[in-house]
Amino acid sequence: MASYDALIKTDGATPVTYNWDKRIFLSKLQDREQAIMLYSKRHRSRFSILDWCRWLIRKRIVTGGMKEWDNILAFHARSLPTVTPVAAGERIVSAGLKESFVVTLGLDEFTPLDDYMKARFAFPLEKARLREKRRLIRAAAQLTRQMHWARLNHRDYYLCHLFVRCEEDGKPDLRIIDLQRAGHRMVPFRRWLIKDLAELQYSSLAVPLSDWDRLRFYAIYSAGNTNRMLRRKMLRRILRKSRAIGTHDARRQRRRGIQSDAPSSLFCITL
């Protein structure tokens, strides 16, 4: 059995992002016939009060890497497309400090959905490109509905956490990534669903989508709900939450001295 240190070894890997809590590396392994890309995410955090309680009562902790591993397996069990898991592990480094990691196969031929839309759907669009955009909107709406009907929510459901590639027949292939914060609930509380949809709504403001595109997404997502009043009420809550996300993000960007790419309009519906 490989040791923890051997599994997190990153010699020759390319760092993707870095901060104290999370380090991400992209590495390549050469197989006999092809190169295999591995995506390694390492978590480090200090014990919270809740962690100390869990440790005292159950002698166990909850780490970001193992939580993401469990969520990836939960998505696979419900036939929701996501990354392919390879390995995961956790350890207590010292009193009050915990580490974990998760390794998955890279999505070599996939592109973040926001980047894909910016590159493919800049106005004006030809009819073929318009049909492609509508197929993608339908696929994203159906995938989001499937995730929520499976009593799963993402909690960080921005367009950059949906990856896409176009199949030979023109059908979009979508994958959901970054599942560390995802939740599985026996009762799918509406506020968590609204949060996911509001995050999509907010992140969609920076990509070339029309209001009709967002209405189309919401109509497909809410298909089957014949109660018009409930649909409108949920829509108002999505827009309210989206405004709150936008306000919070604007404050954070100002503190960092960064200009946000998202326009201020919030008439749009979702996606």
Image (cartoon, rainbow, N blue to C red):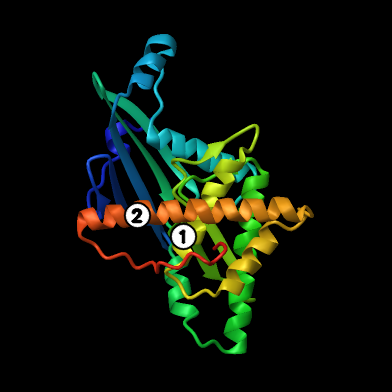
Q: Nearer the viewer, residue 84 or 177?
A: 177
Examine the rendering and report whether any part of residue 167 can be seen: no
Q: Which residue is mark 1?
A: 202
Label 2 neighbour load within 10 Å: few <14, some 14-19, many 20+ = some
Amino acid on which the number 1 mark rests in the picture? Tyr
Q: Residue at x 31, y 41 (%)?
A: 42
Q: Does residue 74 sit above or below 264 in this rendering?
A: above
Between 49 and 18, the residue placed more toward the observer is: 49
Q: Residue at x 42, y 10 (%)?
A: 57
In the displayed structure, 48 sits above or below 256; it is: above
Q: Could you tell me which secondary element the residue under label 2 belongs to?
A: helix
In the rendering, which numbered label is found on residue 11? none
Residue at label 2?
A: 249
- Tags 1 and 2 touching, CB below 8 Å: yes
Name which residue type carries label 2.
Asp
Looking at marks 1 and 2 on the same chain, the residue that comes earlier in the sequence is marked by 1
Q: Could you say where residue 203 lies in the image, as x and y percent from the top left?
A: 45, 61
